[in-house]
Amino acid sequence: MSRRLLVVACGLIYFFLMLPLLVVFPISLSSAPYMQFPPPGFSWQWYERYLDDPQWIEATWRSLYIGVSTAILALALGVPLAFSLVRAKFRGRAVIERLALAPIIVPTIILSVAVYGIFAKLKLIGAWYGLVVAHTVLALPFVVLVMMAGLRDFDRGLEQAAEGLGASRWQTLRRITLPLLRPSLVSAGLLAFISSFDEVVVALFLAGANMTLPKKMFDNILMEIDPTIAAVSVIQILLVSLVLVLIGRFGRGLSGSAR
Amino acid sequence: MQESAELRIEGAAKRFGEVAALDGVSLQVARGELLTILGPSGSGKTTLLKVVAGFEKPDAGSVKIDGVEITALPPARRDIGMVFQNYALFPHLTVERNVAFPLEMRNVAKPEIVRRVAEALALVELAGYEQRLPRQLSGGQQQRVALARAIVFNPRLLLLDEPFGALDRKLRETMQLEVRRLQRRLGLTTIFITHDQEEALVLSDRVAVMNKGTIQQIATTTEIYERPANDFVADFVGESNIFHGTMSAPGEVTLEGGRTLKVRSDKSAGAKVGVLMRPERFDTGGANLFTGDVIESVYLGTSFKLRLACAGGLELLVRQPARGPLPATGARIEVGIDPEAIHVF
Amino acid sequence: MSMRGFWPAVPALLLLFFFFLFPVVRMLGFSLEGGSFDWYAKALGEGLYLRVFWNTFEIALLVTFFCLLLGYPLGFLMATTTPLWATVGFIFVLLPLWTSVLVRTYAWMVLLGRNGVFNRLLIDAGIVEDPLPLLHNFTGVMIGMVHVLLPYMVLPVYGAVRRLDPAIVAAAEGLGASSWRIFWRIYLPLTLNGIFAGAVIVFVLSLGFYITPALLGGGRVIMIAVLIEQQVRETLNWPFAAALSAVLLAFTFAVYALAQRFTRPQETA
């Protein structure tokens, strides 16, 4: 009986969680010229607005390549860092681990303002690679966490076997260790990408006139509730769903075995 | 075709903190020989293997292959084939790629690799399994792939670390014979590590019994079983009745407790000795007779296993061929053993 | 493997040093302009700003409370149901979690506005006459933040309930305990760690929240992060912004430190 109650209550809470995502769909397909609920009719106009507007497309494009660059950089830096943290013994290891995870703990507003201060001096505001660097700082903890979990579960006997069979350290890494860590690498990379693609606060400060998608959305929301935002939101939700599916299929989370 | 090598270990020692895993171990394995290192867990046998393989550096001592010192060489350059207990097959590679791996590491030409992989798989009777993945194979099959991978590059030495521990009994027996057959056929110098003394007796040319980081005895299987050098070896290999006493006269031992035994030994009078009587060497009569009450009797199909309480507090473990009914607890039985069947150490 | 294993970590550490540690420390340093604590005095002394801190703290507490109330049942259900339903539950939690905060916040604006979904439904159904003020105020911010932060509460709770030995529950049932009793006396106390972890995460994240209060608050709900942004971009008062940031940071660290002290050393996230 109380179980039934629990299920019903949870159903409502799930509804609460999904409601905003669901509501955005019909709004994006509304035929009304402004925000109206319920939508009077069906129309693709907002999607067309989005696709026809060079600013929107540019912003999307920018977010995409910043996101991909962030994922690449975060992996390039975070994977070796994770290896060091899990396998090497050196003084201050615990401190370094704290430092690597610190960007999650420090409120993003503080980081954004701080980096803004530096970049303003260096005239890097608006530079896409500046944003990549800042986003990488934010993505690093995710990469480190996922990779450390994957490394901890890794069977080092396989590496020993490879060495016994004549493989050098590098060959073992390339042919055995990394391929077997692929699920973790995939998850880490996708997480890094999404965290950058969605990122608003840092972008607000650093993007300047060269907007990322979230920044443009933010400005748009402040100025007018244009249903184009709804269309963009739907696209965004679909993208995240895709990433989730990819992670489910090819990736591996913080716990549990590789799928 | 590279010839198999002779291995010589001299004075190997290794400490882990307080514990001496290896305490001055020396041994020699002749070309083409299969030596088994037998011992309980913690005896140091795995450490010894790791020292030979190169995964551990000894604190002292040397390892030489064909006279060349390899103690400082990294594992990748030692040209030694290894088979581990948990197979260590690369899960993301097919059987073929697994076996080809060591050849690829040695930059062997593609067509040559294909030929040799096929050869190796045929040797372990897994021809046709090339495209399977390790998780699609049974335990025994995986172990055979591991074996193929270990010999495909013609190593000078083969090391096996309790490879059959995870297999069931029947399979284990089959694999033991297969390894033996393969080793003889290739003439490969081999070291086999196990804690299972039956396995050691089946496979080996010689056996080295280890305990607490030292070698207790190295000898042929017959020697080890019939003429163990000390208490530990006597007790570890096979079932035993071990007692201690002194040589009271030539050919006679007086045990603690007073009982005397007629034995064959050239130890001098007054020497402190150990005495070993294997349970299956007792008969219904003999030069030394024991009368005792059965305190435990077990039916084993082909034999009876009896525990007898005899005079003077002597407890004997006796094996008799299963003839007639199983003696009941409390029954009084007489058994005897001849001097030749008693081993004095 | 001593020092050799350290080298792979160096590039990442360089990045963290130059683009994280250095900028943050440098900025915080601004707060001590002229070597004095004046700006801190202003931040903590003046009623106006003190009220902002207090507001932020209050909102964070309330958000944490509601997330607990709504999040625990969810985590509990997901952890005690079949793998299939658990996966479904996960999707419903992860999808919002990874959808951009912006999208979610915008959606709430659509839902809560004067002409928004809720008000339209309520008016059309005749339940109310005038639209309810659900947006650009405290209520809107609360709803939005709870929605964004709920997943952060659900996941640790899920983990904690999963780790509970089902044999204990079975034993309790066998001894005649009712479901309510079991929940109160067994589940709750033994999953306290998970609850605590979730609460800490939600609370700390609330403290530093920017987007949601900025968009849903309509300028009326000022949380610290919003204030900091204003000081930097509009007023251009860096030293003050730095002082505010320092206080926020100190508070954040204090909460984490306290959390570490009180977490029973059972398991980690």
Image (tube, helix red, strand yellow):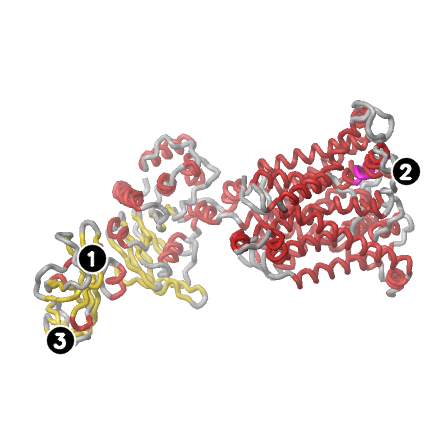
| Neighbourhood count class around disc 1 (C-alpha, 10 Å): few under 14, some 14–19, many 20 upward | many
- The residue pinned by badge 2 equals C130
Q: Which residue does the image show at 76% across and 35% down from the upper left? A: A62
Residue type pointed to by label 3: Ser
Q: Is residue B307 above or below residue C140?
A: below
User: Which one is in front, A231 or B309?
Assistant: B309
User: Which one is in front, C227 or B116?
Assistant: C227
On screen, residue A225 versus residue C165, left or right, reads: right
N-terminal label among 3 and 1 = 3
The stretch of residues the image draws in magenta is C105-110
- Counting the numbered discs, the total is 3
C156 inside magenta stretch? no
The numbered mark at residue B248 is: 3
Q: Hey, which quadrant is residue B188 in on the image?
A: top left
Q: Secondary structure at mark 1?
A: strand
Residue type pointed to by label 1: Lys
| Chain name for mark 2 | C
Q: Secondary structure at mark 3?
A: strand
Q: Secondary structure at mark 2?
A: loop
Residue B342 in percent (x, y) is at: 15, 64
Q: Is residue A28 above or below residue A208?
A: above
| Neighbourhood count class around disc 3 (C-alpha, 10 Å): few under 14, some 14–19, many 20 upward | some
C108 inside magenta stretch? yes
On screen, residue B149 versus residue A214, left or right, reads: left
Q: Is residue C98 visible?
A: no
- The residue pinned by badge 1 equals B305
Q: Which residue does the image show at 36% across and 51% down from the upper left? A: B161
Look at the numbered discs 1 and 2 and tell me whether their residues touch, using CB distance below 8 Å: no
Q: Is residue C101 above or below residue B250?
A: above
